[in-house]
Amino acid sequence: GQQLNQSPQSMFIQEGEDVSMNCTSSSIFNTWLWYKQDPGEGPVLLIALYKAGELTSNGRLTAQFGITRKDSFLNISASIPSDVGIYFCAVDNAGGTSYGKLTFGQGTILTVHP
Amino acid sequence: NAGVTQTPKFRILKIGQSMTLQCAQDMNHNYMYWYRQDPGMGLKLIYYSVGAGITDKGEVPNGYNVSRSTTEDFPLRLELAAPSQTSVYFCASSYGRWDEQFFGPGTRLTVL
């Protein structure tokens, strides 16, 4: 099946630093999604990207849909302790009779030191 | 609204036992999904449903069964539990095909 390669696997940063993570695939996708998972909770959608080259912001978060449609990145500016969690990229396996079937990357674990 | 609720939160099973993981949503969503998350991995789709009475397999359906008799409920059944089914199970729902999926808090299952 399709695979997403997410990097880095983990990050340890100081409060106030900026963070960047990315996700790549060998296949083309028409929708890229970024989720955050807090400990003991389900994932929550942060940003959805629907157009190649699209740059979208949500507060301190910015995500871009790569122009080749094979990658995406997520930036977090001025990190704060509540940014701690696992960040997942996901793609929508669109096409044909596919119904919202998402494929997830393996996640980036973010730790923020006060 | 309670959103997506899952029960139980934790469960330990012996090999060969069966159980049903419950999932309910009160948002009148048409689409519902079951995912499993193994340690250090992303979520993988087990089964999904596009409406009451309609279900289909996802990426990893073996060893599981589902039913969707109502819009609100989407239970996941394990008939013969195996250690490979030790995982965290998430249920999700969305209004339509292209709409945001909302996830429940998860059920942590251990099979010994």
Image (cartoon, rainbow, N blue to C red):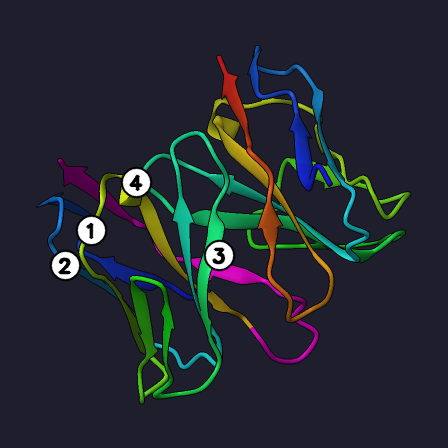
Residue at the spot of label 4: A82
Which is more N-terminal, label 3 or label 4? 3
Tag on residue A45?
3
Check disc 2: other Cα within 10 Å, few if <14, some if 14-19, many if 20+: some
Q: Chain of mark 4?
A: A
Residue B100 x/y as whole percent = 60, 61
Do the residues marked 2 and 1 share a common chain?
A: yes
**Mark positioned earlier in the residue sequence (3 or 1):** 3
Q: Is residue B81 left or right of residue A10?
A: right
Label 4 secondary element: helix
Question: Residues under labels 4 and 2: Cα distance?
Answer: 14 Å
Residue visible at 39% across and 88% down in the picture? A52
A90 or B59: nearer the eye?
Answer: A90
> Residue B106 at what x, y percent from top left?
55, 32
User: On the image, numbered disc 2 is attached to which residue?
Assistant: A18
Label 4, label 3: how far apart the Cα atoms are: 16 Å
How many angstroms separate mark 3 from mark 1 (CA)? 18 Å
Numbered range of the magenta stretch: A94-114
Label 3 sits on a secondary structure element that is strand
Subunit bearing disc 3: A
The mark closer to the camera, 4 or 3, is 4
Residue type for callout 2: Asp
Closest to the observer, B14 or A79: A79
Chain letter of disc 2? A
Query: Mark 3 Cα within 10 Å, few/some/many (few <14, many 20+)?
Result: some
* Upstream in sequence: badge 4 or badge 2: 2
- Quickly name the residue at label 1: A79
- Looking at the figure, which quarter contains the C terminus of chain A? top left
Q: Chain of mark 1?
A: A
- Please say if the residues under marks 4 and 3 sit with CB atoms less than 8 Å apart: no
